Every structure is written in C-alpha cells, then in structure tokens.
Image (spheres, rainbow, N blue to C red):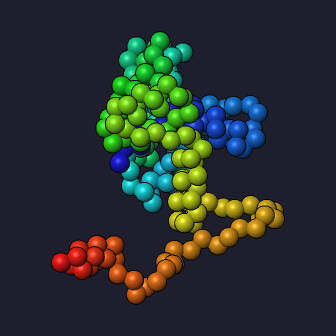
Amino acid sequence: MNIIIDGYNYFHFLLEKSGDSIPDFERGREKIIDRLAQYRKYKPNTITVVFDGTDSYNLYRSNNSQQGIKVLFSAQGEKADDVIMDIADYGDLIVTADREIRDFVENNGAESITPQEFDAKVTMSLLMGGTVKEDDNDDAYRRPISTKKKGNPKRMSKKERKANKFLHKL
C-alpha cells in the first residue's frame, strides 16, 4: 500500500501532541522520518512524505529518500497540497487534515485519514513491536496488549457456514 503524508500537517499534529510551542522544522522533519522508518520495519508499506517548499529557491520538486522513506518538497510557488493531489493514485492512503485534499482523493479512488488516526495506528504498531518507550511516571491504567484470539474455537469458518447453509437448502 502507498501511504502519502502531508508532512507539515502531520508535523503540526505531533507538535501539538508533544506540547512544544516553538517549532523547529528541521528537527521536526527528522523526527517524522525516524518515526516512520520505525513504523516501516513492522508494516512494509511504501511511504511518501510531502513538505511545502514554497519558500525555497528550487524551481522543481526535490525528491530524495531517507531511511527508506521517500521525501518530496514542492517547487517554489507550489503547495504540498497540489503535489499530493498530483501524485495520489487509486488505492493510495492519504494522511492529511485538509478537507479539500481529502475530498479530492476520495473522489479519485484513494482513501484518506487524519493525522490523529494515522498516528494512533503508528503508535499501536510500534507498541506491538516494542520500540516505543512508555513514560514511567504515567499513572494511568494501561491494558496489556494481547494477540490472543477470542471466540469459540469450534465454530466453523464463515466460508464453511455459508456452504453448509447452502447445502441445507437443497
């Protein structure tokens, strides 16, 4: 699956989540790339992060790869939103809070989620993999994460039940 992330949109969500008030864009981009690289170890999806490069002097989009994450900067005078709408394809997952982008990509066959929803999935994957360190001073109750299956082990599968139902009609 291709995941395309509105970089500064996700950056501002993480900034708000951490409680920092002064954004350091360079450091923030590095943190995002590191976090996504950890996530990619457990979920081998193709990840593209698109950042605004409107204030840069690049006449063309710049494109590089860091830790297996594709990083795109928009060209001078171009918004990251335009780049995302340009590269989004059928079946891609777009991570953004911008309603305009979400409507556009959903009308063109892609799916979209908010940075909050995406970060929850990333955090859960990292917790399952054991790479996120939880705060020791957090007194909130945390339910242990388990992969143990629940339900009746003797129940037939959905496919078997459907076939059985069909046979009873004969």
Q: In this view, does 116 lie to the left or right of 91?
A: right
Measuring from the top left, give residue 84's x and y in whole percent: 42, 28
| Closer to us: 169 or 130 | 169
Measuring from the top left, give residue 132's x and y in whole percent: 61, 60
Q: In this view, does 21 lie to the left or right of 47?
A: right
Which corner quadrant of the image does residue 141 belong to? Answer: bottom right
Q: In this view, does 167 lie above or below 57?
A: below
Q: Can residue 87 be seen in this view?
A: yes
| Closer to us: 67 or 167 | 167
Which corner quadrant of the image does residue 15 belong to? Answer: top right
Q: Which residue is drawn at 24% across and 80% down?
A: 168
Measuring from the top left, give residue 6's x and y in whole percent: 50, 33
Q: In this view, does 144 lie to the left or right of 159?
A: right
Q: Residue at x 37, y 31 (%)?
A: 107
- In this view, which residue lies farthest toward the left? 170
Which corner quadrant of the image does residue 93 belong to? Answer: top left
Q: Is residue 34 above or below residue 166?
A: above
Q: Which residue is drawn at 38% across and 55% down?
A: 44
- In this view, which residue lies farthest toward the front? 169
Measuring from the top left, give residue 167's x and y in whole percent: 21, 78
Q: Is residue 166 above or below residue 54?
A: below
Q: How many marks?
A: 0
Q: Quadrant of the C terminus?
A: bottom left
Q: Residue at x 54, y 53 (%)?
A: 122
Q: Can residue 70 be seen in this view?
A: no
Q: Is residue 48 left or right of residue 33?
A: left
